[in-house]
Image: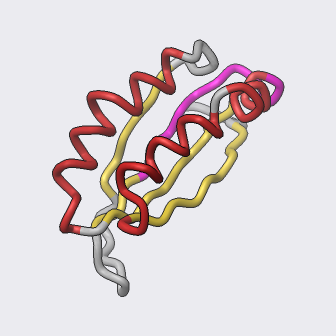
Amino acid sequence: MYIYNVTTNIDESVHDQWLTWMKDTHIPDVLATGKFLSAKMCRVMMEEDMGGITYAVQFTTIDRKTLQSYYDEHAPALRKKAVKLFSDKFVSFRTELEVVSEH
């Protein structure tokens, strides 16, 4: 199993709009690609020096090949929508995690 983790710091001025969009539109759109088994959205509880509110969204997928096909087939268009709606009001970074053990 792999986890595609997207951590985003969102400006407080658009936080509520962004959060609704993430829960009602973006996460369902990512799941609708068929590349992920599930998604979990978490609020990061540490305060950032730069301000804003930080979230991590973890999408679980079966293997690296499936994740790569998401990057190739879907990621650019989905990322473009976020930039169009929230432009300079957020910063995101992505991490790929390989699950090595579950308890």
The residue sitting at 68% across, 32% down in the picture is 2
Q: Horizontal and vertical percent for residue 88? A: 42, 68
Quadrant for residue 25, please give it: top left
Relative vertical location of residue 14 with respect to residue 76 in this rendering, above or below: below
Q: Residue furthest bottom?
A: 49
Q: Horizontal and vertical percent for residue 10? A: 33, 63
The residue sitting at 22% across, 58% down in the picture is 15
Q: Write the start and end of the magenta stretch as one range.
A: 56-65
Residue 61 is covered by the magenta coloring: yes
What is the magenta segment's predominant secondary structure? Answer: strand
The residue sitting at 53% across, 36% down in the picture is 78
From the image, which quarter does the N terminus lie in? top right
Q: Horizontal and vertical percent for residue 14? A: 22, 60
Q: Residue furthest front?
A: 84
Q: Residue furthest right?
A: 65
Q: Nearer the viewer, residue 27 or 61?
A: 27
From the image, which quarter does the C terminus lie in? top right
Residue 79 is covered by the magenta coloring: no
